[in-house]
Image (cartoon, rainbow, N blue to C red):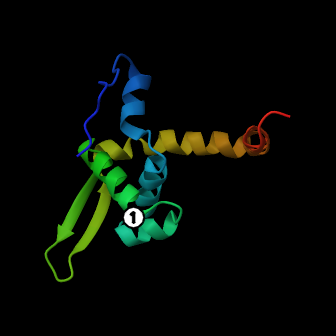
Amino acid sequence: MYERKIQPSLNCGLDLIAEVIYGKWKIRLLWFIHQGSKRPSELQRKIPDASRRVLNMQLKELEEHELVAKIIYPQVPPKVEYNLTTFGQTLIPVIAALGKWGDEHEEHLRMVILKNLKGPA
Protein backbone atom coordinates (compact mmCIF):
# COMPACT_ATOMS: atom_id res chain seq x y z
CA MET A 1 0.00 0.00 0.00
CA TYR A 2 1.15 3.51 -0.81
CA GLU A 3 2.61 5.46 2.09
CA ARG A 4 3.32 9.16 1.79
CA LYS A 5 6.88 10.28 2.27
CA ILE A 6 5.90 13.90 2.90
CA GLN A 7 2.95 14.83 5.07
CA PRO A 8 0.43 17.13 3.38
CA SER A 9 0.29 20.81 4.23
CA LEU A 10 -3.15 21.53 5.67
CA ASN A 11 -2.75 25.17 6.59
CA CYS A 12 -5.63 26.72 4.67
CA GLY A 13 -8.79 25.91 2.77
CA LEU A 14 -6.97 25.59 -0.56
CA ASP A 15 -4.58 23.02 0.92
CA LEU A 16 -7.52 21.07 2.32
CA ILE A 17 -9.51 21.03 -0.90
CA ALA A 18 -6.40 20.09 -2.86
CA GLU A 19 -5.87 17.12 -0.58
CA VAL A 20 -9.47 15.97 -1.06
CA ILE A 21 -10.27 16.54 -4.75
CA TYR A 22 -6.98 16.72 -6.63
CA GLY A 23 -6.59 13.69 -8.80
CA LYS A 24 -7.02 13.48 -12.52
CA TRP A 25 -10.51 11.99 -12.43
CA LYS A 26 -11.96 12.90 -9.01
CA ILE A 27 -13.93 15.98 -10.06
CA ARG A 28 -15.41 14.12 -13.02
CA LEU A 29 -16.25 11.11 -10.83
CA LEU A 30 -18.09 13.35 -8.36
CA TRP A 31 -19.96 15.06 -11.20
CA PHE A 32 -20.97 11.83 -12.93
CA ILE A 33 -22.13 10.26 -9.65
CA HIS A 34 -24.17 13.42 -9.04
CA GLN A 35 -25.72 13.02 -12.52
CA GLY A 36 -26.76 9.45 -11.76
CA SER A 37 -23.91 7.21 -12.93
CA LYS A 38 -23.47 5.08 -9.85
CA ARG A 39 -22.04 1.74 -10.97
CA PRO A 40 -18.27 1.35 -11.56
CA SER A 41 -18.91 0.10 -15.11
CA GLU A 42 -21.01 3.21 -15.89
CA LEU A 43 -18.27 5.47 -14.57
CA GLN A 44 -15.70 3.56 -16.64
CA ARG A 45 -17.78 4.18 -19.78
CA LYS A 46 -18.03 7.89 -18.93
CA ILE A 47 -14.25 8.15 -18.45
CA PRO A 48 -12.76 5.67 -20.96
CA ASP A 49 -9.25 7.20 -20.77
CA ALA A 50 -8.93 6.16 -17.13
CA SER A 51 -7.96 2.62 -16.19
CA ARG A 52 -10.30 0.66 -13.94
CA ARG A 53 -7.52 0.48 -11.33
CA VAL A 54 -7.06 4.27 -11.21
CA LEU A 55 -10.81 4.87 -11.03
CA ASN A 56 -11.10 2.40 -8.17
CA MET A 57 -8.23 4.08 -6.31
CA GLN A 58 -9.75 7.52 -6.74
CA LEU A 59 -13.22 6.29 -5.74
CA LYS A 60 -11.66 4.76 -2.63
CA GLU A 61 -9.99 8.08 -1.77
CA LEU A 62 -13.29 9.93 -2.28
CA GLU A 63 -14.91 7.38 0.02
CA GLU A 64 -12.17 7.84 2.64
CA HIS A 65 -12.75 11.61 2.50
CA GLU A 66 -16.47 10.97 3.04
CA LEU A 67 -17.52 12.51 -0.29
CA VAL A 68 -19.01 9.28 -1.66
CA ALA A 69 -20.54 6.23 -0.04
CA LYS A 70 -20.06 2.75 -1.47
CA ILE A 71 -23.00 0.35 -1.31
CA ILE A 72 -22.35 -3.36 -1.87
CA TYR A 73 -25.47 -5.40 -2.55
CA PRO A 74 -25.30 -9.02 -1.31
CA GLN A 75 -26.01 -10.86 -4.53
CA VAL A 76 -24.17 -12.95 -7.09
CA PRO A 77 -22.44 -11.41 -8.89
CA PRO A 78 -21.89 -8.61 -6.36
CA LYS A 79 -23.42 -5.27 -7.28
CA VAL A 80 -21.65 -2.05 -6.22
CA GLU A 81 -22.98 1.48 -6.38
CA TYR A 82 -21.58 4.83 -5.34
CA ASN A 83 -23.64 7.75 -4.08
CA LEU A 84 -22.67 11.23 -3.01
CA THR A 85 -22.84 11.79 0.71
CA THR A 86 -24.50 14.92 2.07
CA PHE A 87 -20.98 16.29 2.48
CA GLY A 88 -20.15 15.37 -1.12
CA GLN A 89 -23.27 17.17 -2.34
CA THR A 90 -21.82 20.43 -0.97
CA LEU A 91 -19.07 20.24 -3.64
CA ILE A 92 -21.48 20.13 -6.59
CA PRO A 93 -22.03 23.92 -6.77
CA VAL A 94 -18.25 24.42 -6.67
CA ILE A 95 -17.69 21.90 -9.47
CA ALA A 96 -20.52 23.49 -11.48
CA ALA A 97 -18.89 26.93 -11.07
CA LEU A 98 -15.53 25.55 -12.24
CA GLY A 99 -17.20 23.95 -15.26
CA LYS A 100 -18.99 27.20 -16.09
CA TRP A 101 -15.71 29.12 -15.89
CA GLY A 102 -14.09 26.56 -18.20
CA ASP A 103 -16.97 26.86 -20.67
CA GLU A 104 -16.77 30.66 -20.62
CA HIS A 105 -13.03 30.61 -21.32
CA GLU A 106 -12.96 27.49 -23.49
CA GLU A 107 -11.40 29.05 -26.58
CA HIS A 108 -8.62 30.82 -24.68
CA LEU A 109 -7.87 27.82 -22.46
CA ARG A 110 -7.74 25.43 -25.44
CA MET A 111 -5.36 27.77 -27.29
CA VAL A 112 -3.03 28.14 -24.28
CA ILE A 113 -3.01 24.43 -23.51
CA LEU A 114 -2.31 23.42 -27.11
CA LYS A 115 0.39 26.09 -27.43
CA ASN A 116 2.12 24.77 -24.32
CA LEU A 117 1.91 21.18 -25.56
CA LYS A 118 3.84 22.15 -28.68
CA GLY A 119 6.67 23.60 -26.59
CA PRO A 120 8.72 26.73 -27.19
CA ALA A 121 8.59 28.20 -30.68
Whether residue 58 is visible, yes or no, is yes
Instruction: Determine whether, in the image, residue 119 is placed left or right of residue 19.
Output: right
Q: Seen from this angle, which residue lies furthest bottom? A: 76
Q: Nearer the viewer, residue 56 or 16?
A: 56
- Residue 32, placed above or below residue 1: below
Name which residue type carries label 1: Arg
Q: Circle 1 sits on which residue?
A: 52
Q: Nearer the viewer, residue 45 or 120?
A: 120
Instruction: Determine whether, in the image, residue 108 is placed left or right of residue 101.
Output: right
Please report the residue visible at 27 percent of the width from the left and 42 percent of the height from the top: 2
Please report the residue visible at 52 percent of the width from the left and 66 percent of the height from the top: 48
| Residue 19 x/y as whole percent | 37, 33
Please report the residue visible at 36 percent of the width from the left and 60 percent of the height from the top: 53
| Residue 61 x/y as whole percent | 30, 46
SS for tag 1?
Answer: helix
How many discs appear?
Answer: 1
- Residue 59, placed above or below residue 16: below
Q: Seen from this angle, which residue lies furthest right? A: 121
- Residue 54, placed above or below residue 62: below
Instruction: Determine whether, in the image, residue 33 is placed left or right of residue 105.
Output: left
Whether residue 85 is visible, yes or no, is no
